[in-house]
Every structure is written in structure tokens, then in C-alpha cells.
Amino acid sequence: MKLHIHDTLKREKVEFVPKKPERVTLYVCGPTVYSYAHIGNARPVVVFDVLFRLLRNLYGEAHVVYARNITDVDDKINKAASDQGVDISVITNRFADIYNADMRALGALEPTLQPRVTHNMEAIVRQIQAIMDNGHAYAAEGHVLFDVESYRAYGALSNRSLDDMIAGARVEVAPYKKNPQDFVLWKPSKENEPEWPAPWGAGRPGWHIECSAMIEANLGLPIDIHGGGHDLIFPHHENEIAQGVCAQHGHGAHGHAQPEYARYWMHNGFLNFGTEKMSKSLGNVKLVHEMIKETPGEVLRLALLSAHYRAPLDWNGDLLDQTRARLDGLYGTLRKFADVAVREVVTPAGVMEALCDDLNTPRALAELSALARVLETAETEAARIMAKSDLLAAGLALGILQGDADAWFKAGASEDLTATVEGLLAERAAARAAKNWAESDRIRDALNALNVEVMDGPGGASWKLKVGA
């Protein structure tokens, strides 16, 4: 089955053809680790986790290399470290660990590689030097700046004209720049800030060069797919392309064919909170670290996948309630058929077709619901085995439905509460068998007081904690 994705640079859906099928490479911009990640930060993690799973399905687990970086030097990191009187590593190690744990709670697989900026300084300095040697950057007052006029393809990803950008620039923000659009590759560190040696003076890298250098050092150029949020298209990814291309020989400035940097670009849409994009600067964020204390990570994950990844997603309580109900239904089906065996897991064709159509997760989820209905209505054991296997395989492709069904409904219940509920259910069953309806109703009221919902079925009563209990 062929994968088609919407390429931001080509502005159309295209067939994905990796440069080397035996080594498919994916890079996604990761966090700057100075604070907790909000749920908007988690959307690219979940989206590209589904892509990672799909690529491994198509090409084999051993043939896909997925890198998601950690930015561990930054103005905000420096400020946090200074305010607390600690080394930046104290801040970055803490929040990198929290970030990774929070993303695991959302069902994200560990990336193959997680390069850190501070571990790749030599590669960063090396790439900056190559850009300078190729005539695309210059040193000025302790800074090294990329000369955007030297790279005429600048603006192609974001569909901006370089001439228009230069003509529209009103303020020369730094007198040492040749033109206002030139951006920093290296800058001097301020007093008491961390710094690293470089031929043009000690300092630290600009943000954009970090990713392009880590990609070249850890994955090699060109990579197959570069992903990230829509807000990174300009200037971050635009600048990455300029750096990555111009660091290579035959950079196209003198009639040579332009080398590749990333063969395909994918960008997810914003997460909206009310009428505004969710962002720390607006102060309307919902932190993953706090949300997973109240809401199962699987609910948050499925909510993030409920809309197509390129579309905006409105984040609200109704979305979470609907998603929880959807998962309750799916896990309820699995609990009902808990004794049915499972054959070898192979992702059903309908789900694969949906995901290969530019990660169409809404369509994939519709296929998932259809598979659950097939299991519910299967009339033979062989049909039930196939249907349950297909449902679990479809869930695996999306990173859901891999937990124990009973545990799903009882999540958050202590051992004491579980024992109490199971005892009351046994008493209720005895009362119903004796047609002692008054006692049965009394016990049900007691269960309601414990925020327990009882579900009667052909196989007896089951239970779950009510949402918000």
C-alpha cells in the first residue's frame, strides 16, 4: 500500500517515496525544556507518533529512524537557571524527564533518537563554518549571520517572496546586519550565561541552526520527512532549509543543482482554546502534566486524533467527554469478548487505507467503530476471533486500545474500593436472584454513592468509575 502525504513545500498531496526504503528518516522539532508542555505542544507528538507507527508498519521497525530533538539551551532556560542559581542542566534534565514521561502517558512511542543541542555543539559549529565557507554567512561583532540574499530560494516553503520581504522591512534591528532579514547562526553569550568555543568567538547558537545541524549529524542529509507544527513553517523551517542546503557543496548559488535537505514537509494545525490559538504567551494553556492527573492519557490522545492533523482542533470539555464515551464503548466491546482469542495482529486494510491517505485519522476512527460493530454482531467463534484481532490491530496503529478492558473501567479505583464494589455486586446479584428488589435497589444506591456505575449484561453485572469521580 502506498503512502500519500500533503507536502507543505509542494502544496499538494503527493506519493511518499523514501530515498532509501531500508532507512526511512523522520525528524520532528521537539521541546525547549524550561517548563511543562501544554496540550497544544502534544499535538505534533501524537500526530507524528501515528506516522512513526505507520512507517514502521510499511517498511519494518528496523528500517525507520525517528529523531525528536531536545532544545536545552535558550534564553528562557538561562533565565530559569539564573533565577534559581543552578546550572542550566538542572532545569533541562528535570523538564526533559517530565516531558518524556508526559508523552509516554499519551501513548507516544520513544523516538529512535533524541539529540540534544548541548551534545551537538561541534556539529553546529561545523555546519556554520560550512555555510560561511560557501559564501552564505558572515561574521559581525561576535555574531554570525545568514545572508538571505545569497540564497534566492529563501521563502519557498512559506510561499513568501524574498524581494517582498526585503522591500517590506522597515526597521534595521541590528546595525551589523547586511539586511534586516538576515538571521543569527551564532551569537555572543551574555555575562554568566553558558558559552562554547567557536572560530568567530565564544558564544552559543541561534535557534534555527540547532535543528539543521542535529539533522545532518544524526540522520544525514537529505532526510525523508520533516514534521512540526504549522507555526514553525516561518521562520524556523524556512531558515532550516536555507542552512541545510547552503551548508552543502553545490548549493545552487552558481548554477549547480540545489541539494536536498528534507524530501517532504508535514505540518499539523493549531489547537484552539475558544477563539484563540493555545499558547503560553496568551496564558490559555492546559498543561499535559496536570491534565493526565484528571483524564486518562488515552482520552487525550484520541481527542488529539479526532480531527485531521492539518485542520485546527477546538479543545473543550465536550470533546473530552465525547472521546471518553467513545473509548468506553470500544473497551466495553473488548470486555464483553475478553475470552475470545486473538490471532496474529495485522492492521486491517480499511484502517491502512485511511492512514495512508495523509494520516486521515477521522476516517481511521470510523473504520475502528465499524470493526467494533463487526465484533458485536459476529455469529461464530472464528468470526469473533478475526473481528477482535482486527479491532486490536487497528487500535495499535493509532496507539489506543492496548490496555486491559477491566482496568480501563476501574482506573483510579483503589484496592479497597475495588473490593468493596465487588462485594456489593455479589450481594446485589444474590438479592436479585432472591427477587429482593428493595435490597437490590439499596445496594445500587450505595454503589451510586461511591460514584460507581453498574452495567448489567447477559454475562452479569460489570462496573466502572463515573467520569470525574
Image (tube, rainbow, N blue to C red):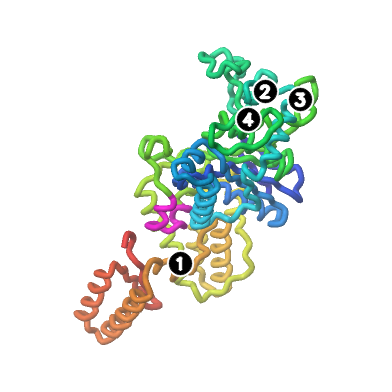
Q: Could you say where residue 273 lies in the image, as x and y percent from the top left?
A: 38, 40
Name the residue nearer the viewer: 319 or 343.
319
Could you give the CA–CA distance between mark 1 and mark 2, rounded to whole angstroms? 64 Å
Could you give the CA–CA distance between mark 3 and mark 2, rounded to whole angstroms? 13 Å
Identify which residue is drawn at 61% across, 24% down: 155
Residue linked to disc 2: 139
The answer to which image quadrant residue 130 occupies is: top right
Mark before the other along the chain sequence, 1 or 2: 2
User: How many numbered dots are placed on residues in this image?
Assistant: 4
Q: Residue furthest toward the bottom?
A: 434
Which element is circle 1 on?
Answer: helix
Q: What stretch is highlighted in magenta?
A: 288-302
Q: Is residue 300 magenta?
A: yes
Mark before the other along the chain sequence, 4 or 3: 3
Point out the frontmost of discs 1 and 4.
4
Residue linked to disc 4: 186
Which element is circle 4 on?
Answer: strand
Residue kind at label 4, given as amino acid type: Trp
Using the image, determine if residue 144 lies above or below residue 20. Answer: above
Residue kind at label 2, given as amino acid type: Ala
Q: In this view, does 214 lie to the left or right of 390?
A: right
Residue 134, label in figure: 3
Q: In this view, does 444 lie to the left or right of 369?
A: left
Mark before the other along the chain sequence, 1 or 4: 4
Which element is circle 2 on?
Answer: strand
Residue linked to disc 1: 333
Identify which residue is drawn at 69% across, 46% down: 25
The answer to which image quadrant residue 210 occupies is: top right
Which element is circle 3 on?
Answer: loop
Residue kind at label 3, given as amino acid type: Asn
Mark before the other along the chain sequence, 1 or 3: 3
